[in-house]
Structure formats: C-alpha cells, structure tokens
Image (spheres, coloured by chain):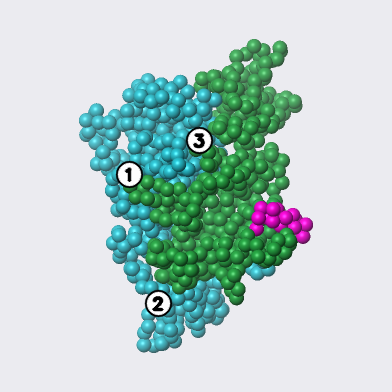
Chain colours: A green, B cyan
Amino acid sequence: MSRPLPLRRTLAADLPSCPPGDPVLLQGWVHRRRELASVTFLVVRDRSGLAQVVLPPGSAVPPEETTVAVQGVVVANPQAPGGVEVGEATVTALTEDAATPPVELWRPALAASLPTLLDQAPVTWRHPAQRARWEIAAASLRGFRATLDGVGFTEVQTPKIVESATESGANVFGVDYFGRPAYLAQSPQFHKQQLVGVFERVYEVGPVFRAEPHDTVRHLAEYVSLDVELGFVRDHRDVLAVLRETLAGMVAAVQEYAGPAVARLGIEVPDIPAEIPVVHFGEALRIVGAPDDEPDLAPEHERALGSWAREQHGTDLLAVEGYPMAKRPFYTHPQPGDPRWSNSFDLLFRGLELVTGGQRLHRPSDYDAAIRARGEDPAAYAAYLQAFRHGMPPHGGFAIGLERWVARLVEAANIREVTLFPRDLQRLAP
Amino acid sequence: MSRPLPLRRTLAADLPSCPPGDPVLLQGWVHRRRELASVTFLVVRDRSGLAQVVLPPGSAVPPEETTVAVQGVVVANPQAPGGVEVGEATVTALTEDAATPPVELWRPALAASLPTLLDQAPVTWRHPAQRARWEIAAASLRGFRATLDGVGFTEVQTPKIVESATESGANVFGVDYFGRPAYLAQSPQFHKQQLVGVFERVYEVGPVFRAEPHDTVRHLAEYVSLDVELGFVRDHRDVLAVLRETLAGMVAAVQEYAGPAVARLGIEVPDIPAEIPVVHFGEALRIVGAPDDEPDLAPEHERALGSWAREQHGTDLLAVEGYPMAKRPFYTHPQPGDPRWSNSFDLLFRGLELVTGGQRLHRPSDYDAAIRARGEDPAAYAAYLQAFRHGMPPHGGFAIGLERWVARLVEAANIREVTLFPRDLQRLAP
C-alpha cells in the first residue's frame, strides 16, 4: 500500500484553474465527439462536469459513452467552456467501444419517453439534467441528517423484516422467513417509537414497502422514508416545529451542495417560512368549500389549499392539523377536549401531501383501549407495547417521502422520474 | 405555530453549568429512587445522562422507568454527580406507573442473559452501557458519510426488492411481489456498480438480507451494509486506500461524537495506521502454516493472522489480497498475469473478517465470459450488463458490515448484542 490515491487526475471542473501549458490527465466518458474537416472535438464528461479536448483532424476517438483517459496540455481558449480546453491530446480507451446509448445523452435536454427513461435507467441517469435530480436528493439527505444531528437526535437502523404489519393489514408484502410468514415493514413506526424510550430523539433513513395496488404518478411500491420521532413534546405543534427546522436544513443543503444541479434544472428552491401556517382540518374543508362531514382531503382539495397558502401566506407550505381520528392510525393522539379530531397533521407542499406526522399515544391504557376499539387484541401487539408499559414520554414524529420531496422540488410529473430504480405494480427491474 | 420549542427544559448534562439557586425543569425517566429515613433521592435519566434530585422524606416518587417532569432549584453539593443536584423539587408523572423492568437498569453493569437482552430489547437498550453500543454505531455512520462526502462521493439509495439474487442463488429471501416471485437484495452490488457509471463514486447505507441457515455469533439474517464503489481506479489497492480513509473517518467520528459512550464502555478505539499492511493470500497461508492449496481462510487462520499483524505491524488491521478466483463472485477482477488469483481483498480487524472488497470487471466481454464460465447465460443479467455495454471505467468497492464493526469495537461476544432488533433463524421480534 505504498501508492498514493490517483490524485494526478484533473477533474473537468478544475480545468479552468490549471495554468495554460500544464500537462493534465482527464478521465471520463466520451460525452460527444465531433469530427470537422480541420479539427476533431471531444467532450469528456466526468463527475464534475464537461471538458473540451481538441485533436488533429482524423483522430480516432471511441464512440460516445466509452470511458477514456486523455493526456494533453491546458490551452486557453475564450470560446471553450470555462475558457480552457485540452490540446496536444492523446486518447486512450479504458474499455471496449460503448454501444450506442438509447437516447442522445449529449443533447442539453433529455428527450426520452418514460418507459425508455426507466428501462434504461443505468444509462439515462448519466444525462446531466437527469443526474441533477438525484444530486438534489442526495443533498437533501445530507441536510436532513445534519439538522437532526445538531439538535440531539440519534440515527437508528431498524429491521425491515417484521412479524406483523405496522400501518394496517393491507398493502403489505409477504416474505417467506425460514418457512414462517413475515412482512416487509410499511414504516419504522413501531420501532422508532420504542427507541424514543431509549434515545428520546431518533431518526432513520431507509426503505419502506407498500404493496400499492394502484398505478399512479405519486405511489411507489418501495420508497425512501425520512423518519423522525421525538419525546417530551407538548403536542403535535412541537413536532411541526422540528419538521420546519428539518425542511429548512434540507433546503439549505440543496443550495450548498447541489447548487450546480439547481442551476442546471432551472428550478426554484422554496423558502421555508419562519413559521409554517397551520389550519385545522375543519377550517380546511371550509376554505375549499367541501361539506363539513368529509373525512379526508381529496387531491383537488389539497391543490386548492396549496393555492390558498400561496395567496394568503405567500408560502409553498401549509400544515393541516386535526385530521379526523377515524382516518388516522390507532396510535394517534386525539385532540384534547374533542376526540373526534386528532393531534396529527399533514404538511402540504405546493398542494400535495408531503409529510404526515403528529403526536402519538403514550399511556399503555390508552393503547389498550385504542386497539380494542378497533376490534383487536392488545396481546397481538405485545412486543410493541412493552415500551409503553415500561414508561414512555409524550412523543410524536413525522415521515417525509424522499421521492415526493424531490419530485415536488424539481416539478417532475411522475415520481418515477426522480427514483433511481423505481419499483411499482409492473416494474421489478432494472 | 407561535410557540417556541420547549427549550426551557434543562438536560441532565447541562445541570452542572446552571447557577445554584436557578429554577430548572428536568424531564426524563425515573432511573432510581431511594427512600432513606431523612431524605428521598431520585435519579432522573434523560438522553444526556443522569441527574440527582433530593426530596423530603416520604415523598411519593413513581416507580423506576416512569417518565416524569421535575421542577426544582439547582443546589451545589460536592457529593452529587457533577457537583450539583436539584432540590425543592416537585415530581409530576407523565404517564402511568411503569411496570418493573425485566432487569435492573440502574445498576452500573447490565446483568441480562442474551435471551432477556433480545426479547426485552425496547427496555434493555435503555441501560446506559447498552445504549453506548449503539451510540458508537451511530457515530460510525456519521464518520462514514462525512469522509466520503468530502472526497466526491454521492449517496445513493437502491431498491431492496430485486428480480434476481445479487450474490448467489443461495440464502435469499423470497417475496411475493404482486403475485410474481422476487427477492430481497443480498447486497446493492449490481446497482452500486451501475451507478458508478453515473456518479463515479457512490456509497449507500442500507439493509441487506441473507437467509443464513446457520445460527452463529457473527451472522444475522438482516444487517446494515456500508457500501462503497468508485470508478477510475488502477486496481484494488486504490480501493483499499479509500477504505483506509473511511475507517479513519469512522474512528475519528466515534472519538468526536461518542466519547462518553467509549468512556462508559472502557473500550479501546483502534488507531488506523497510515498504511494498512497487506499480505497476499498465498503468503497468508504460509504465515498460518496452512497447505498452499487451501481455497479460503478458516476462522482460526484469521485469528492467527490478526495476532501476526499485531506482532509484526503493531496494528489491529490486516488486508489479505489475491483470494483465489474460484472463491470470489463472477464480477471479480482477476490478478493481472495470474488469473488463479483475484484483485480482491478481505480486511481483517482483530482477527475477524470485517470488510470484503476488490476490483470488479469492467469490460462487457469479460462479463460475458465470466458468466458463461459459471454455466450461466449473460442474457439473464441483461439489466445489470447494460451499464457495461454502454461504457464503464475500471472500478471497485467494498462493503463494511455495521454490526460486525461495532461488535469488534466493543468486543461483544455475539453480534446480536450490538444490533437494535436482530433478525436471525429464530428471531422475528421485537
């Protein structure tokens, strides 16, 4: 192990700061080759960007997407990207000639149908505009964790193979577990609550699984859930305050770490208001003109509320609190004084549900009653209820769907467009 | 949303810096209550540590593990932990009286049998010494990501439901995927390689699934894999250099973020040497006195090599490179000039395999040949091979098992002791 890392390589983005005349080694993909009568241009793509290479006419350049090493010298050229190109170059292929890509990756806009985009994902993600979408996802994850690490949260990793459904018996994938029936976790809900009993404040980033029988533009069978749970809250409003901080941290990280991706996509990153406006569910129904016995908000209601928040509060974010208990999971804490309503909320982002959260029950007797009220036996939840019988604080939490967050940020029409390798009713590969 | 976060609360760890006489609010668990003739002591545990509360004799204090709020004033007392305690206190329970814990959590050492530790995990993890183990895991994850974020890696999240086995056909869990057969990913290997074609340098932290039919102290059916893959390497030695940086970053983060946990456990955090010593597989066989046609290292060989590294190189780490190709997966790059051996390595940490890594094939024709040599049809790997047919760089990577890493650091006899909610041949709950 006496060799240094291969640091002699120059990244495309660093080329403009190299002195003209210096020898350089580029490594990357043939993004584009253009053979003119007097000169051959080669554009090399690496993880940092694009670099222009000039070769004598008639030079052999491997086809697009072949990986190459290019040795040459830095040449100032005001017409080249960044004012610099590589001349006196020799090109060495690092693999066999690449097959022709399913779409022209060198064009500024990616013109691919959705099936092509998804079927050929390992190749179509290489397009700089497509890759920018995931760069925003990765930066968001960084901001999520950094925010929570900074305020006393502990990251946890909980099992995805579970004994029983966590959210409801429906839409759950079965697993053959050494001959016994088991399930893929629909959420880390039960485990993250139990771990509030240990660490007070926990978060987890991980896959969750929903056997969604519907083929829609906003559902996936497997997605990345950003889960948070915290103890010693007064009610769901304290949870919402942490959610606000978290979203602000995610947006700041997108600006800091994915600035070029934001610029490439030309998107508008939202301002997170100092306080997220909140309306009660009953008021939300009045705002959208729905009957006051509606048990849930329809997509068109959410869109109308999104417009209302933009007009009334000048923000993309609106929290709706107090959802009817009948539509919330059994662990939801009721609204004190009026148990028809709950201490839970949905956060709408640009008129679409992005986050669900709220306060949970914490007294064991409340759990027993809530489970019995649903016609079930608390004994079936013995492992989960252990934590409560042995002392839990008032607590609550939320979950952000990574793909929904990114889809809204980049205004993708279909959630699959921002998912590296989506899984749905039809799709199990690549 | 006009209320601030409940910042008025004082954490136990901050109590020593509060001026005597100041009013404080503690929130936490009744860690210990002791009723003496002249005074009642209450020790409150929160996420930051322990605080001593003094109450008049005969005061009602809820049983251990009940969550409470304590209001009182700061009193200097040289005999109290941190030189400070809370006096003039009133105690309010936040839930019903907690049931008696399965083990005495207030004792300095956790005296629980392994079945109790695991069956009652939501409660036993509350013990400060047990919790310290996970705090080391969480700090390790932070160091892993920070190191790689700093050198141009992109975090990815790949699907855990896959069409075919990634490592071998054995030990794979089946999933009923909308009526079609599918599997739980044994590793993100195929996807992380494909994504090298997009981002050059990627990492993923996520669950992997192995239907391990063996009940051993070092295997789990589900564990957390820290996966790394990078392009434009010369060979596996470049991969090993990144692994060294990563481990150094993990150790630094353990020191920085889990210092109290390290102290509580009294463990020795390893120094990561500037260069990890490397021996070739053939030499390793000679060192341990094994026949030179042994195809693999047995656990006793690994232990002997661990001792040898400690004696010869003064380090806990030893890389063994060149494992026989016959024992490595088909995507492994052979050793140039001698294809009996491979450009792969195992990293031994204190005499136990901790990391497997190496250089992968990158030419499509090499993949076709390697797959055919195993008697399989490359067409069965069409989705995977797309990336290679469209241009991939020389690349390699590694995977660290989080639980193995922590088990070695804290010298746990059984990997289950450091796993929040382990899954194995027998265990599917809690």
In this view, the mark in front (3 or 2): 3
The amino acid type found where label 2 is placed reads Pro
In which quadrant of the rendered view does residue A340 lie? bottom right
Residues rendered magenta in the picture = A297-312
Q: Is residue B9 left or right of residue B380?
A: right
- Say which of B370 and A364 sits in front: A364
Pinpoint the chain carrying mark 3. Answer: A
Magenta-drawn stretch, dominant element (helix, strand or loop): helix
| Disc 2 crowd, CA 10 A, few/some/many (<14, 14-19, 20+) | many
Residue where numbered disc 1 is placed: B212
The amino acid type found where label 3 is placed reads Ala
- Say which of A420 and B253 sits in front: A420
Residue at 68 percent across and 44 percent down: it is A411
| Residue B243, position as x, y percentages in the image | 44, 39
| Residue A258, position as x, y percentages in the image | 64, 43
The amino acid type found where label 1 is placed reads Glu
Tell me if residue B201 comes above or below residue A61 in the rendering: below
Pinpoint the chain carrying mark 1. Answer: B
Residue where numbered disc 2 is placed: B63
Q: Secondary structure at mark 1?
A: loop
Residue where numbered disc 3 is placed: A429
| Residue B152, position as x, y percentages in the image | 56, 39
Q: Secondary structure at mark 3?
A: loop
